[in-house]
Image (spheres, helix red, strand yellow):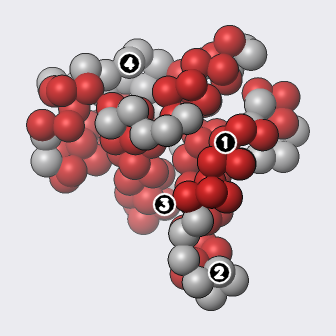
Amino acid sequence: MDTYNPNKPVNSESWLALDEDILINLVLDYHSGLDLELTDDGLQLHASIHVIVENQLAMEVDLIPETIAKLIRQGLNRHEAIHAIGAIITEDIFDVIKGNIEEFSPKKYRRKLEKLTAKRWLKGQY
């Protein structure tokens, strides 16, 4: 695997076989061609979240493949669906960092994934 396109499914075995730094760089390479208003640190974080979601998809973490498929059926493209799930992950990470919660809750994460729809995502309600 030498390129990444978030609108195309990755080969799970090939993806998981690569070092995380390589995966992040593949995501960065894809996004470098887009006109994003992100700082270098912001782009690095963005790429890392992509890798987290793709890893969960490749490992078939409970509800992740189903949620991606549901969001795509509802009209999002795959890239947008990755962002929607990534937003939930990011929110939970920030809550832990800020001390709002003590630890990540898989049950809460699952509930958020179950509630997530394309319509809610597009309204900023995830």
Where on the picture, by quarter, is residue 58? top left
Query: Which amino acid does the dot numbered 1 rest on?
Result: Leu
Query: Residue 89's spot in the image, x, y percent?
Result: 56, 55
Q: Image check: 105 left or right of 27?
A: right
In the rendered view, tell whether residue 32 sits above or below residue 87: above
- Asked if residue 68 shows in the view, the reply is yes
Q: CA distance from mark 3 to mark 1?
A: 24 Å
Q: Residues within 10 Å of mark 2 (few under 14, many from 20)?
A: few
Of callouts 3 and 4, which one flags the residue occurring earlier in the amino acid sequence?
4
Q: Nearer the viewer, residue 11 or 29?
A: 11
Give the labeled residue for mark 2.
101
Q: CA distance from mark 1 to mark 2?
A: 18 Å
Give the labeled residue for mark 3.
42
Query: Residue 3's spot in the image, x, y percent?
Result: 23, 25
Q: CA distance from mark 3 to mark 4?
A: 24 Å
Q: Residues within 10 Å of mark 1 (few under 14, many from 20)?
A: many
Q: Image check: 50 left or right of 59?
A: right
Residue displayed at 69% across by 83% down = 100
Residue situated furthest bottom in the rendering: 99
Query: Which amino acid does the dot numbered 3 rest on?
Result: Gly
Query: Which amino acid does the dot numbered 2 rest on?
Result: Ile
Give the labeled residue for mark 1.
113
Give yes or no for contact between labels 3 and 1 (Cβ–Cβ under 8 Å): no
Q: CA distance from mark 4 to mark 1?
A: 19 Å
